[in-house]
Structures are given as structure tokens and as C-alpha cells.
Image (tube, coloured by chain):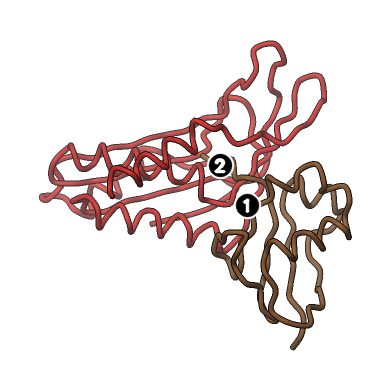
Chain colours: A red, B brown
């Protein structure tokens, strides 16, 4: 399941749903939650605004997850990503993966969040407590990490 | 049909002051050629020209991809979700 939404999500509900769908088969369930954090300690963050490309966004995340499902032995996945205005400490993204063995869940979950950061069309605009606004720039380390996953598969 | 639909996102939308527009193209053209025309139309994009990313019909493409009439072309800076 892939969802892009403005409202918050309940992590316990998402984990429980993912687990129940494959109860009996599930040997491992991995969950990752991304939060709004203070990007720069010298200039405190007030809010983060997330813009996305509707349609392409959902499809791109689904493609990433389906690729992970082919590459690793996972039973299912769930990704929920929020958009709109978010405050410091709020949840931004949930990635859940379940599998028979933990190794596949760890690898698939890490790949999904890495690939999402470089491929899913979201953009963050940060507003500082001073009122200054700017668009967050993509980190080179994120691009390198995703490229490493692709190289490992060659 | 000899036009494409162009979508602008995030900082690109702010600089062009547009979110969507229809754009006439006479013939299929490469993304790199079209980006040059885009920057001519919106000089504010010039400083970020090298960073601009393009999606055609909702798929990421390289700058040597071809845009044809009827396509949905989106322009944006590198993505920052997650």
C-alpha cells in the first residue's frame, strides 16, 4: 500500500495492519519513521512545507517497492508519506516491510527509503523561526547511497 | 495536437510564477534543446539550469530524451522527500 496524504498517520495501526495481512507467514516486520527535524542548529526550524507531484509520486514509490519485492524475499510493504505544512517533531514518512526472514526486511526497507529520497517527486521548503524560507537541497550522500544499491545489483 | 503541457514544481514554480501552461512545439525535440528554450523564456531559471530535472509523462528522463506533442512535461529541482 502506498499513500500520500496531508493528515498524520498512526504507526501502531499501520504496523498491525501489515502484520495481520500476513499473520502466520510474517517472521519479521521492519518499520521506519522519518520526522521533521531541525536542519540547522544555528537557525532553528519553524515548519516544513512538503510539495509533491500527484500521480507520479504514488507511481514512483510503488515502482520502488515493487522492485524491492522482486529483489528481496518480502511479503508486503506499506509506505505513507505526508505533504503540506508540518511542524518540528511531526512524522513525515512511514515505511513498513514484512518478510519471512529479517535480512530481507532490513535490506528492502533501507533500499525503499533511500530510493524514495532520490526518486519520489517531493520537495521540502523550510521556514526558520526568523521567518526566512528556502527550498531544501538534495544531499549528495543520498544520491550516492541510492547509486550504491544499483551498483550492488550489477 | 502540437502542444505540450508543462508543469512547474517547488522553486521552479516560484521562479516562473507558473504552475502549469500549454506550450507549442512544432516537432519532437530533445529535453536539452527544450530546456534551453525554457531558460530563454524564464531567465530566472538560468542559475539552476544545470540542476533542472525533467519528467515526461510522469517518468524521470535524461536530457537526451525526446519530447513529443501531447506530452506532459514536468520541470523541477532534485527531489527532497523522505
Q: Residue furthest bottom?
A: B1
Quadrant housing the N terminus of chain A: bottom left
Chain ID at mark 2: B
CB contact under 8 Å: marks 1 and 2: yes
Task: Please give the name of the residue rendered at 39% of the width and 38% of the height, measured from the top-left corner.
Answer: A11
Q: Which mark is residue B81?
A: 2
Position of residue B71 relative to residue B82, above or below, is below
What secondary structure is found at the residue carrying circle 1? Answer: strand
Closer to the camera, A145 or B17?
A145
| Left or right: A151 as drawn, with respect to A29 | right
Q: Residue furthest left?
A: A24
Q: Quadrant of residue B74?
A: bottom right
What secondary structure is found at the residue carrying circle 2? Answer: loop
| Coordinates of residue A38 in the picture (x, y in percent) | 61, 20
Task: Please give the name of the residue rendered at 41% of the width and 42% of the height, measured from the top-left corner.
Answer: A147
Residue holding disc 1: A52
| Coordinates of residue A148 in the picture (x, y in percent) | 37, 39
Q: Quadrant of residue A30?
A: top left
Amino acid at each position: 500500500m502506498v499513500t500520500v496524504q496531508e493528515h498524520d498517520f498512526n504507526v501502531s495501526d499501520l504496523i498491525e495492519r501489515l502484520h495481520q495481512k500476513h499473520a502466520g507467514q510474517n517472521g519479521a516486520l521492519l518499520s521506519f519513521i522519518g520526522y521533521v527535524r531541525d536542519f540547522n542548529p544555528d537557525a532553528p526550524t519553524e515548519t516544513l512545507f512538503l510539495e509533491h507531484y500527484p500521480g507520479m509520486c504514488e507511481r514512483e514509490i510503488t515502482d520502488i517497492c515493487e522492485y524491492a519485492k522482486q529483489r528481496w524475499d518480502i511479503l508486503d510493504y506499506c509506505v505513507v508519506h505526508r505533504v503540506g505544512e508540518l511542524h518540528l517533531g511531526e512524522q513525515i514518512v512511514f515505511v513498513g516491510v514484512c518478510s519471512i526472514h529479517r535480512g530481507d526486511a532490513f535490506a528492502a526497507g533501507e533500499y525503499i527509503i533511500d530510493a524514495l529520497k532520490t526518486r519520489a517527486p517531493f520537495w521540502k521548503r523550510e521556514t526558520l523561526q526568523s521567518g526566512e524560507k528556502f527550498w531544501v537541497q538534495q544531499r549528495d550522500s543520498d544520491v550516492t547511497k541510492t547509486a550504491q544499491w544499483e551498483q550492488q545489483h550489477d | 495536437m502540437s502542444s505540450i503541457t508543462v508543469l512547474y514544481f517547488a522553486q521552479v514554480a516560484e521562479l516562473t510564477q507558473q504552475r502549469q501552461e500549454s506550450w507549442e512545439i512544432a516537432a519532437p525535440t530533445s529535453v536539452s534543446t527544450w530546456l534551453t528554450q525554457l531558460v530563454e523564456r524564464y531567465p530566472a531559471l538560468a542559475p539552476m539550469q544545470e540542476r533542472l530535472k525533467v519528467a515526461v509523462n510522469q517518468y524521470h528522463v535524461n536530457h537526451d530524451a525526446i519530447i513529443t506533442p501531447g506530452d506532459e512535461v514536468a520541470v523541477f529541482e532534485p527531489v527532497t522527500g523522505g
